[in-house]
Amino acid sequence: MRDGFESQIKIHRPAGKSGGPLLVLVYGGGFVVGNNQQLTPYGRGLARAFDAVVVTIAYRLAPEHKFPTAPNDTEDTLLWIAKNAESLCADPSKGFILGGISAGGNLSAVIAQKTLEDKSLAHPLTGLWLCVPLVFPNKDLVPDKYKDVWFSHEQNAEAPILDKDAIDAIGGHLEPNESSPLYSPFNSKNPHKGLPPTYIQVDGLDPLRDDGLIYEQVLSENGVKTKLDIWPGLPHAHFAFLPFLSGSKKAILDTFLGFGWLLGVDISPQKVQEVMVAPAGG
């Protein structure tokens, strides 16, 4: 890391194969909990499904490490991965995707935007996966034409798993600069245009629902190819916390189909069942 801290990554490769696409996954946990072991089932499954090299990264957490440590760690790690792709036995020309869940989706969005503007990656990203992401820390950032439809934070203020009190507590621990481009891509000077195809997932019973819905609309308006999956009536990251639900099984299937869309590869539901052991995330 830029301050000398040594971070760890976890690498998943298909047995006996190399030169596949490169997928970088960022875990969630509200910037305050979690680790890159959370995404191990995804890492293993995606590596097997797409003959890909999948890297799950780590970043330092609040409250010990305030903003912007997490996005800085994410950026530094992504830059290193891109520079060392060949030594990781990956071929980014076959696909280079960054993505994450919840806080990991936020980090993926802001760092994709920053590295695009900086032209800092050794290989350009070819896709983004944003699962139940935080995009708007406050209503001021929502484009005027969408302010009236950004109401899930109020509508789902008492939702299970993630509610308004939890969101407020996270902000208190993180102490972010809400006007920073490292906290929302809408703070960027030149947002949205030129981003790679983006796959967004939202839960209907999630305070963050409208963040994802509006971001997908704005990206599409700016010429970005998008794919959107909506899981009605389900709470934030339901697949991680309620894996027994049929909706959780569908979410896992949708995720693999979405990665197939990003990579231009068809994958069958049967193949997903073969490669995926259990859901994870958060």
Image (cartoon, rainbow, N blue to C red):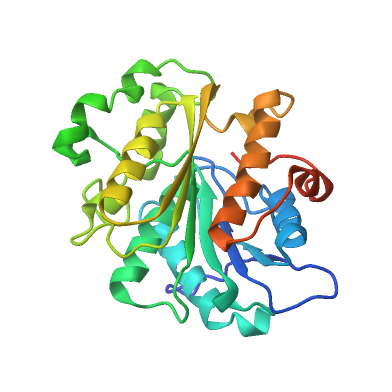
The residue that appears at 52% across and 82% down in the rendered structure is 83
Figure check: 261 above or below 212: below
Figure check: 232 above or below 65: above
Q: Looking at the figure, which quarter contains the C terminus?
A: top right
The residue that appears at 64% across and 64% down in the rendered structure is 55
Horizontal arrangement in the rendering, residue 172 relative to residue 58 (left or right): left
Res. 222 image quadrant: bottom left
Q: Position of residue 279 (x, y in %)?
A: 71, 39
Q: Position of residue 165 (x, y in %)?
A: 40, 23
Figure check: 203 above or below 101: above
Figure check: 119 above or below 196: below
The residue that appears at 43% across and 72% down in the rendered structure is 3
Q: Is residue 59 visible?
A: no
Between 48 and 81, which is closer to the camera in this rendering? 48
Q: Farthest left residue?
A: 144
The residue that appears at 31% across and 38% down in the rendered structure is 214
Res. 263 image quadrant: bottom right
Q: Position of residue 195 (x, y in %)?
A: 36, 62
